[in-house]
Image (cartoon, rainbow, N blue to C red):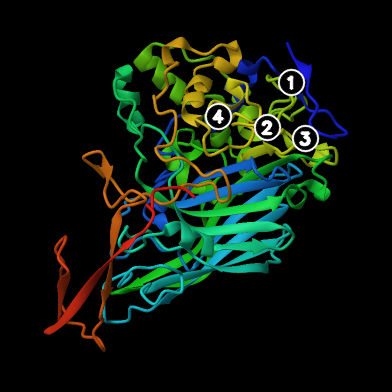
Amino acid sequence: MSHQLRYGARRRTVGVLVGVAAIAFATVGGPALPVAGASSHREAPLVAADPAVDNTDVYAFVSPDKPDTVTIVANWFGLQEPNGGPNFYPWATDANYDINIDNDGNGKPNLSYRVNFTTDDRRGGTTFLYNNGPVTGLDDENLLFRQNYTVSVSQGADDWRPIAHGRVAPSYTGQASMPDYDALRKQATTSLPGGGTAYVGAAEDPFFLDLRVFDLLYGGDLSEVGTDTLAASNVNTVVLQVPKSDLALRNDATRNPVIGVWSDTERKTLQLTPGAATSVGEFVQVSRLGNPLVNEVVVPVALKDAFNSLSPSRDATIPEVVRRVTDPELPKLIEALYKVPAPAGPRNDLVEIFLTGIAKKAPTLDGSAPPIQADLNSQILNADVQASTFQPSEMLRLNMSVPVTAKPNRLGVVGGDLQGFPNGRRLSDDVVDIALQAMVGAAQTGKPVEALAAGDKVDANDTAFSGSFPYVALPSPGKTTGGKAVGQTSSTADTTNTSVAMPQGGDDDTSAVLLVAAGVGVGVLVAGGGLLLIRRRSRRAPSPSSNG
């Protein structure tokens, strides 16, 4: 059964199938959402070797505390070990980090935001340290490695116009070094023209799942579940919050509420010489991400690098890509291991999810009627879209007119929450559990497959998200020891700041040893024969793992 739901003052009513299972299991998973390697972390051979420009996840949702805006979170440089110094995780200065919006359904951006970076490296030849004392602000002299960002906008052409400048919140190097990361995050947040906001810096990775899917789909018997593989790891993130009208076709979010979102990265070729890498030539797209989990297990390995280079407008023109959607590999693997029958092909339900969005009149590849007869999140629902220009293409689609849910359900539409995934993607949406069901045919039957109902048993992120911008959690301090995060203290615990007297000048042959024992008031830095005192002073500071 279905009925019509009215969202605000829309002139066109968006019909949504309220027998939720039929939409949800089809829309949430589709070919875009089989379970896979931490969304898009290391998903293709080439970009896996260049993590600084590797897109990992994209989220798009109506802002819960500012419902006239949409928040887009785009992450890069996944699987960050928080203690991974001394270089940590800088943004590439020879790359374009883009967030794209398609509001007319032709698979090409109508609006794009670009973030570029510059570096202010103050270390010279004197030290290996990222910071040489506690960092209490982005202008703190103790912060030796700094980056700045510029946000530019384009209206669908190569007409980039800078609209904002800001300072990057640095990689989190530890409690003693950065006792109040939330303060740094606030300083890395800047206003955009027209009422928008941007944050650029580090965050705890919001994606949650058990990554042992690669060990024969959780051990071959679902015994390897329940561990959040990405717990205590960080990412580099860009968070943009912009008015709905900025994103909508003809700036009218009432008539045209559906948008498609994806991120990409462009990089120049690196020319390697002994001890140096020089950027040369034109920018080339090397990474791309819309829906989570697409390039991991839908696209075969021989096409993964090519898929990263494609514009969404070309997706449906590549026969091998289309074939992997209509005849996906993952359901067959599930059948072999767990004896859950793979649905018969061609999987036109997945084509609708993967390439067109959900709508009763969504264009199909073979001219047949869309198998999911419901109106949810295809740009074809926009009043001012020309159907003749609609192009099937993969992207994360969001119907901005769906009201914010007072009590979000982690299963999104599956759980009766029409604002959740696949209608955009919120930080707390459990895409993995829904994806498992989609790939084994729940879209066709309207019923979840009981044998896989428990999913991966990772139902929430290990760190709570914030209720206000930028919503992502503060960076993690690292792995746990004895039940307590390394470097994590309570909000009332004493923390120690260290100021280091740096040597004058530099010596390429300098070897330095830092000898600071816990609880000792004075440490010694031996550098090039010099003896430097490190004074430790106590202060009280909030935990870096708390959200605020």
**Which mark sits nearer the N-terminus, 4 or 3?**
4
x, y percent for residue 95: 51, 64
Q: Secondary structure at mark 2?
A: loop
Mark toward the viewer: 2 or 1: 2
Q: Residues within 10 Å of mark 2 (few under 14, many from 20)?
A: many
Residue to which mark 3 is pinned: 380
Do callouts 2 and 3 mark residues in contact (Cβ within 8 Å)? yes
- Secondary structure, mark 1, is loop
Label placed on residue 325: 4
* Residues tagged 2 and 1 counted as in contact (Cβ below 8 A): no
Q: CA distance from mark 2 to mark 3?
A: 8 Å
The residues bearing labels 4 and 2 have C-alpha atoms spaced at a distance of: 14 Å
- Residue indicated by mark 2: 357
- Disc 1 to disc 4, how far (Cα)? 17 Å
Does label 4 or label 2 sit earlier along the sequence? Answer: 4
Give the Cα distance between marks 4 and 3.
21 Å
* CB-based contact (under 8 Å), mark 1 and mark 4: no
Query: What residue is shown with label 1?
Result: 369
Which residue is painted at 37% across and 14% down in the image? 338
How far apart are the alpha carbons under marks 1 and 3? Answer: 14 Å
> Who is closer to the viewer here, 414 or 139?
139
Residue type at mark 4?
Val
Q: Nearer the viewer, mark 4 or mark 3?
A: 3
Q: Residue at x 60, y 14 (%)?
A: 444
